[in-house]
Image (cartoon, helix red, strand yellow):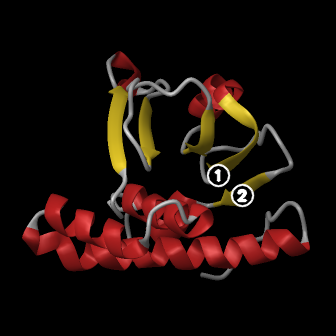
Amino acid sequence: MDGKNVIQSQSYGPEARGGASRAEIIIADGPIFFPKATWLDIMLAMSQKASDEYVFDLKNGGTLIVDSTYVSQIPTSNALVIPISARTRQHFGREIFSNIVALGVLCEATGIVSPKALLAAIGRRVPRETEKINIEAFNFGRKLAEKFHQKQGESKHDTVAADS
């Protein structure tokens, strides 16, 4: 992706059945010598349990993005709060695309990887028959991030989130 080195690790054991699961992605310009993150620069919390359990691994001044559909107790006022799953359900009729919408949110909010590189990765990873809707979900997430980032710049907490 964008000429960067990437490694991903995950913790999806029994936690995936209702507990907090975790996936770590390390992106670096140079070699990656250790495949586990010690401190997180960016954290996306898609559940209250994950937020509660892993927020302490976020670096001081790191970027926290929460899906306010399922995370109601935000651990800091310096978080990007977006109802990712609710907006996905509104727009697509179901939440199954929430992870791709969240990827679009991360792309737009952090700029760490270009949209072009992520769209290419989506094209390589999703079934051909779902490529178009996954691309739409990714772009929808980018628009959500842009919109909520602007709103939250005006007021620290956005709880209204009525229009999409």
Q: Position of residue 101 (x, y in %)?
A: 44, 65
Front-lying residue, 10 or 127? 10
Amino acid type at image mark 1: Ile
Secondary structure type for disc 1: strand
Residue at 15% x, 63% y: name it: 124
Determine the image quadrant of residue 32. top left
Tell me if residue 7 comes above or below residue 164 in the rendering: above
Q: Residue at x 50, y 28 (%)?
A: 37
Residue at (56% x, 23% y) in the render: 38
Residue under numbered circle 2: 80
Q: Amino acid at mark 2?
A: Leu
Residue drawn at point x = 47 percent, y = 24 percent:
19
Say above or below: 103 vs 5: below
Name the side, left or right, on which 52 lies relative to 113.
Answer: right
Residue 18, picture quadrant? top left
Q: Is residue 21 left or right of residue 119?
A: right
**Which one is in front, 52 or 40?**
40
Residue holding disc 1: 65
Q: Is residue 92 left or right of residue 71?
A: left
Q: Position of residue 66 (x, y in %)?
A: 64, 50
Q: Are marks 2 and 1 in contact (CB under 8 Å)?
A: yes
**Is there any visible trace of residue 38 in the rendered image?**
yes
Q: Locate the C terminus and report the quarter of the image it occupies.
A: bottom right
Q: Position of residue 116 (x, y in %)?
A: 35, 76
Tell which circle, 2 or 1, labels the residue nearer the N-terminal end: 1
